[in-house]
């Protein structure tokens, strides 16, 4: 899944699809992109018509649940600890960039991941 469907998200999605990735779920500020998403410009309409083959709907919560990979190219503070726990416990994190900002945390991402695993 890709969080953020600006220029970087669109480019990354196109690269992944060209490389043969089977499906991508793209999420913007309104939720998972679908052909029914309102007010899509040409680029996002293309993304909506070439991704999300399962027809998933909803927001970030629904997109993260079941994601194999998370790529974040959006604003900060959108991915919550609950999302991180889902990725860690069910799929494993393979790539995180940009969207994860844990406030007031000195130990870094790895330490926080280990703490979340101990909690669950």
Image (cartoon, rainbow, N blue to C red):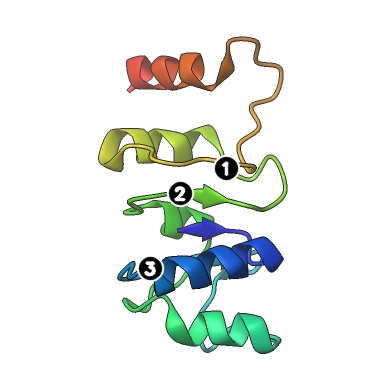
The vertical placement of 60 against 81, above or below, is below
Cα separation between marks 1 and 2:
10 Å
Q: Mark 3 points at which residue?
A: 19
How far across and down, in percent of the image, does residue 45 sit?
59, 87
- Secondary structure at badge 3 equals loop
Depth order, front residue of 107/30: 107
How far across and down, in percent of the image, does residue 79 sit?
57, 42
80 displayed left or right of 29: left
74 displayed left or right of 31: right
Q: Residue furthest left?
A: 90
Q: Name the residue under label 2.
A: 70
Cα separation between marks 3 and 1:
26 Å
Q: Residue furthest top?
A: 107
Q: Looking at the image, is mark 3 or mark 1 nearer the viewer? A: 3
Q: Name the residue under label 1.
A: 79
Q: Crowding near pointer 1: few (<14 within 10 Å), some, many (20+)?
A: many
Quarter of the image where the N terminus is located: bottom left
75 displayed left or right of 87: right
Q: Crowding near pointer 2: few (<14 within 10 Å), some, many (20+)?
A: many
Residue under the point 43% across and 65% down: 16
Of labels 2 and 3, earlier in sequence is 3
Of labels 3 and 1, earlier in sequence is 3
Q: Looking at the image, is mark 2 or mark 3 nearer the viewer? A: 3
């Amino acid at each position: 899944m890709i969080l953020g469907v600006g220029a970087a998200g669109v480019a990354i999605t196109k690269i992944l699809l060209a490389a043969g990735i089977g499906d991508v779920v793209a999420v913007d500020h309104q939720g998972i992109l679908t052909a029914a998403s309102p007010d899509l410009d040409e680029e996002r309409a293309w993304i909506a018509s070439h991704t999300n083959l399962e027809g998933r709907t909803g927001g970030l919560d629904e997109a993260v649940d079941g994601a194999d990979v998370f790529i974040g190219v959006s604003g900060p503070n959108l991915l919550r600890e609950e999302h991180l726990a889902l990725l860690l416990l069910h799929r494993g994190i393979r790539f995180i960039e940009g969207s994860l900002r844990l406030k007031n945390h000195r130990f870094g991402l790895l330490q926080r991941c280990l703490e979340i695993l101990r909690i669950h």
